[in-house]
Amino acid sequence: MFWDIIFTFLISFSPFGEARAGIPYGELNGIPILWVLLIGLLGNLLIFPIFYKAIEVANKYLWKHKAYKKSAIYLALRARTKTKDVIQKYGVWGLMVFVMIPLPVTGAYIGTIAAFIFGISYQKSLIAISTGITISSIMVASFMHVI
């Protein structure tokens, strides 16, 4: 069970599913639903502060390198395309709703990139993305518990 808890956390922190995949993994491996929710939520909530600061540091020191700049621009354009309409129309609330939708490519990683690109303040982004992640995680855990 220890390794299932670790894997639930790591899946919830990874960009390949976040808590949307971590919570079902933990539930299907016999971890109690409340523990799964807390572990998945914690893993997913850690994404924003770590990834946002990583973007700031990477842009500061690596922007001059062609390979980094090319991949950063690609990710930025992708995030802008996915989030542009909802964030331009609804601002911080749109960011929260975008992250809250429990579908692929609408999670904390793309939300963090979008917040950075659109220049939303760190504090407002933290609150919006954390709220979206919390609501999404509760929805996924509720769905898994019912099944």
Image (tube, rainbow, N blue to C red):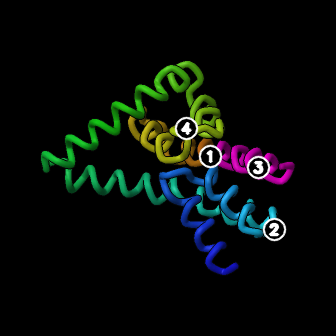
- Identified at 69% across, 57% down, the residue is 23
Report the mark closest to the observer, 3 or 1.
Answer: 3
Label 4 Cα crowd, 10 Å radius (few <14 / some 14-19 / many 20+): some
Q: Pointer 3 and pointer 1: residues touching (CB < 8 Å)?
A: no
Front-lying residue, 72 or 116: 72
Mainly helix, strand or loop, the magenta region?
helix
Front tag of 2 and 1? 2
The crowd level at tag 3 (other Cα within 10 Å; few <14, some 14-19, many 20+) is some
The kind of residue on which mark 1 rests is: Ile
**Distance in Å between CA atoms under marks 3 and 2:** 14 Å
Q: Which residue is mark 4?
A: 106
Q: Name the N-terminal-most of marks 3 and 2.
A: 2
Residue 111 visible in the displayed image: yes
Helix, strand or loop for disc 2 = loop
Q: Earlier in the sequence, mark 1 or mark 4?
A: 4
Q: Which residues are magenta?
A: 130-147
Q: Earlier in the sequence, mark 4 or mark 3?
A: 4
| Residue of label 1 | 127
Q: Which quadrant would the N terminus be assigned to in this image?
A: bottom right
Mark 2 or 4, which is nearer the eye? Answer: 2
Residue in the foreground of this view, choosing between 58 and 43: 43
The reply to whether discs 2 and 1 touch (Cβ–Cβ < 8 Å) is no
The CA distance from mark 3 to mark 1 is 16 Å
Picture quadrant of residue 131: top right
Disc 2 residue crowd, few under 14, some 14–19, many 20+, Cα 10 Å: few
Q: Which residue is mark 2?
A: 32
Q: CA distance from mark 2 to mark 1?
A: 27 Å
* Amino acid carrying mark 2 in the image: Pro
